[in-house]
Structures are given as C-alpha cells and as structure tokens.
Image: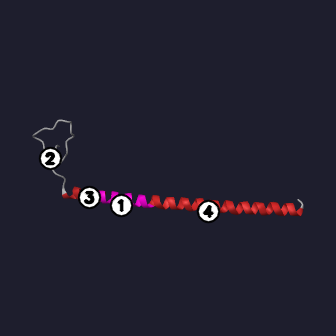
C-alpha cells in the first residue's frame, strides 16, 4: 500500500534512508497558479477596500446635504406657521 510518492508524516526526527520525491511539474504549476490567484485576490480586495471608503465618504456627504436641506425646510415651515398665526 505504501507508494514512493506518498509523503510520510514528519515526526521531528528524520530517517536518513527516507527521502521525499520532489513535487511533480503538475503540482508545481498548480502551486504557482494558486499563488497568482492569491495575489490577484489580494489586489482585488485592496481595490474593493478603496471603493468602500469612497462610497462611505459619499454617503456621509449626502447625509450632511440631506440634513442641511431638512433643517432649512423645517425652518421654512416654522416661519410659515408663525407668520400665518398657527
């Protein structure tokens, strides 16, 4: 059942008679592809973080603008009620 390609678990002491086979080209290509994908995802995450910060800033600006207009609308309504005697 033991195959020379199966990696035996390391126990802290290595046997001088046992050597692991180097990874196959297919495995190395897969590792490289995964590293490339990891870097792409990191860049995408950083870009998304920047977009989120920008959107949060725009939301705050819009909130301030809405509050400003609501205050003026409230003042306008209060002045109308006061002028009309209500």
- The residue drawn where x is 82% and y is 62% is 79
Taking depth in this image into account, of 38 and 9 the one nearest to the observer is: 38
Instruction: Say which label, 2 or 1, has the lower sequence index.
Output: 2
Q: Percent x, y for residue 56? A: 54, 58
Q: Secondary structure at mark 4?
A: helix
Q: What numbered label is drawn on residue 62?
A: 4
Image quadrant in which the C terminus is located: bottom right
Callout in the foreground (4, 1): 4
Q: Residues within 10 Å of mark 2 (few under 14, many from 20)?
A: few
Query: Does the residue at mark 2 contact the one at mark 1 (Cβ under 8 Å)?
Result: no
Q: What numbered label is drawn on residue 9?
A: none
Query: Does the residue at mark 3 contact the one at mark 4 (Cβ under 8 Å)?
Result: no
Q: Percent x, y for residue 84? A: 88, 63
Image quadrant in which the N terminus is located: top left
Q: CA distance from mark 2 to mark 3?
A: 24 Å
Instruction: Say which label, 4 or 2, has the lower sequence index.
Output: 2
Q: Percent x, y for residue 16? A: 10, 39
Q: Which residues are magenta?
A: 35-47
Instruction: Say which label, 3 or 1, has the lower sequence index.
Output: 3
Name the residue carrying label 3: 32
Name the residue carrying label 1: 40
Q: CA distance from mark 4 to mark 1?
A: 33 Å
Q: Secondary structure at mark 3?
A: helix
Query: Does the residue at mark 4 contact the one at mark 1 (Cβ under 8 Å)?
Result: no
Name the residue carrying label 2: 4
Taking depth in this image into account, of 33 and 5 the one nearest to the observer is: 33
């Amino acid at each position: 059942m033991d195959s020379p390609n199966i990696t035996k678990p390391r126990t802290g002491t290595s046997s001088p008679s046992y050597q692991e086979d180097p990874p196959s080209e297919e495995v190395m290509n897969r590792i490289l592809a995964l590293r490339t994908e990891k870097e792409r995802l990191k860049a995408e995450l950083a870009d998304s973080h920047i977009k989120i910060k920008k959107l949060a800033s725009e939301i705050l600006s819009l909130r301030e603008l809405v509050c400003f207009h609501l205050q003026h609308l409230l003042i306008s309504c209060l002045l109308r009620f006061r002028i009309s005697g209500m």
